[in-house]
Image (tube, coloured by chain):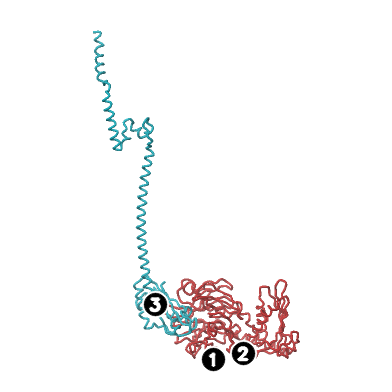
Chain colours: A cyan, B red
Amino acid sequence: MRYGTYLVPAAIVLTLGSLACKPPKTAEEIKAETQAAFNEGYQAFKDGKARETNPYVTAKDAKEIPHKIQGWYDGWDKAKADKDAADKAAAEKAAAEEAARKAAAEKAAAEEAARRAAEAEKAAAYKRAADAALKTIHFDFDKSEIKEADRALLQGIADFMKAYPAAKVEIEGHCDERGTNEYNLALGNRRAAAALAYLKTLGVDEARFTTISYGKEKPLCTEAKEACWSQNRRGEFKLK
Amino acid sequence: MTRFLVRTFLFALAALALQAQQTEVVLSASSSAKLVLGMAPPKASGLDEAQVAAEFTAVLKRDLDETGVFAVLQEGLPAATAPAKAWKEAGAQWLLNVRLAKGPAGDLQLDASALDTAAEKAVFTKPYKADRMVPLRRMAHALADDLVARLTGERGVASTRVVFVRQMAPGVKELFQIDRDGANLVQLTRHGSLTLSPSVAADGRLAYITYKGGAPEIWGQRRRDGAHEKLYPATGSGIMLSTPVWSPDGRRLAFVQGDRRGNSDIMVLDLQSGRARRLTDGNGINTEPSWNPNGTQIAFTSDREGGPQVFLMQDDGSNLRRLTGEGTYNASPAWSPNGAMIAYVSRFEGKFDLFIYKLGEGKAYQITTGVSTSESPAWSPDERRLVFTSNRFGSMQIFTTDLSGRQVVRMTELPGCQSPKWTRAR
């Protein structure tokens, strides 16, 4: 029984040991395992996950010091790669934003140009309408009555003022040289006032007009003859 | 009127004083007789003879000729050293001796004396001193004025000046002044715009209209030799303004303000308070105010009865009455310095002539005639002449005439002149 006392545990140990210890791998097995590992790595490589699923490196090490793992450094720098990727993404984003901004600016510029063109066209139309409407009227010697022939011109001015409600006009009264300087200043004022009164009867607000007299101080023509004097006895209309 | 009486009284005194010597000819302002003056060649030391001849002798001769009371002896002159008797025989009633000397510092000394050749007695002696800045021609003017004062009791006008408007470019006019003999042209304003209607106060201050801000404004000087500043309106503008005229005391400005109904009215601005008062009633055109010498009445042009005519009123607008009767266009009244006459223009056949209305007689006298126009009369300070504008040589130039209209003298050779005003004060 003495030997039996040791035999039972020995048998248990041997049984367990034979269960625990596998027999050494055969060459075939090793080859197959290697092939499998290769295939797995190749597949991972193809999936773009090669570095992450390296079976020899813990996930933590792979993240923090992949290039320091013995036998596995190929110059790849994750921090740099991450930075590069971030920079690239940022650059792409900035480029996209820049392009968007440019497009927006171009659009705005185009709109502005269109608006300007429209405005210029409007101003030109206003100017043309003003030039067409604001014609000089004439007076008889020492008179300030509106002549029959000038009524159509004044109607044209009234129409212009109604078509362009923002328009403001200065009425200038002028005289020929055959009067004293000072009396002609008063006469020019009366001529401007006569034109103003007539325009008022045509329904234009008189607050949109200013009047000014230049007497005989700004003649159009300086010869001493009636053809010249009749040109100088005038009322001019100027946009303000 | 008081001033006129005082003047007459002084004149009578002067006449008595002269008569007491029983040796002289006394001329009244209305007399056409002239005193014949012989001018001995000036004795100059330290001065270039040609300069003295051009800037003193010639200037003095012209001044005296234009006084209307002296005739400078031109022909048959005795030798330079001849005695007074020889001058008397040559026709001179007075003999003028002049000594000019230039000091080491450039200062000038002028000793003038006049001798009555009949009595061989001095009738005038006066020394003049001037620093280097005073030109010889001003000394000649001063001597001419003193000689006239000695003869008539009132200073001559050789030292006076005329302020006027001149066109610089179309639509740009500026104020200028010129000596009475046409020398020494000076530009007074540089507004670069229409600048019109100058008036000169008794102390030389200017007032005028300028369009520099677009609409007309009254500008001028509040103090003698002061800066030019806006006088009216205080704020805003846009109304028609013209013709500011200083009152004789220089405290008020008569001017013309237009409204938007075509009327223009005579206003009076009190410079001290800045308040303006309307004198006429918003009835037609009222313009061209002219004060009487004591500032109680205003002559002006109005078309209230049809065409332009000259009216008078008190300085508060009361007592309105029409002055001119004949003619369809009478304007530009100018009250004479002693108040007895009003010069004005009257249009006939498309051009103007100068007239003088004598208030004492109630009659008008024509001064100028001719095919050219004569406008804008203004009185000389001694009331012997009128300055006016005329186109008799083509463009508008400034002329003077005596009250007979026979002695017309051209003052400028500048085209485009208007609105002359004659003053002692500048």
Residue A197 location, x and y as percent?
Answer: 38, 79
Query: Which chain's residue wears label 3?
Result: A
Which residue is disc 3 drawn over? Answer: A135
In depth, the one of A104 and B42 nearer the eye is A104
> In the rendered structure, which amino acid carries the disc numbered 1?
Lys
Q: Let me know if marks 1 and 2 both belong to one chain.
A: yes
> In the rendered structure, which amino acid carries the disc numbered 3?
Lys
> In the rendered structure, which amino acid carries the disc numbered 2?
Ser
Residue B157 location, x and y as percent?
Answer: 62, 82
Mark 3 → mark 1, Cα distance in angstroms? 47 Å
Q: The C terminus of chain B lies in which quarter of the figure?
A: bottom right
The first of marks 1 and 2 along the sequence is 2
User: Within 10 Å of the Cα at label 2, are there few (<14), some (14-19), or many (20+) other Cα atoms?
Assistant: few
Mark 1 → mark 2, Cα distance in angstroms? 17 Å
Residue A204 lies, with reference to residue B95, above or below; the image says above
Residue occupying image coordinates x 30% and y 38% = A48
Query: Which chain's residue wears label 1?
Result: B
Q: Nearer the viewer, mark 3 or mark 2?
A: 3
Residue A201 relative to residue B373: left or right: left
Per the rendering, the mark at residue B363 is 1
Q: Is residue B113 visible?
A: no
Mark 3 → mark 2, Cα distance in angstroms? 56 Å
Q: The N terminus of chain B lies in which quarter of the figure?
A: bottom right
Per the rendering, the mark at residue B30 is 2
Residue A41 lies, with reference to residue B116, above or below; the image says above
In depth, the one of A237 and B344 nearer the eye is A237
Contact (Cβ within 8 Å) of mark 1 with mark 2: no
Residue B168 location, x and y as percent?
Answer: 52, 75
- Mark 2 residue element: loop
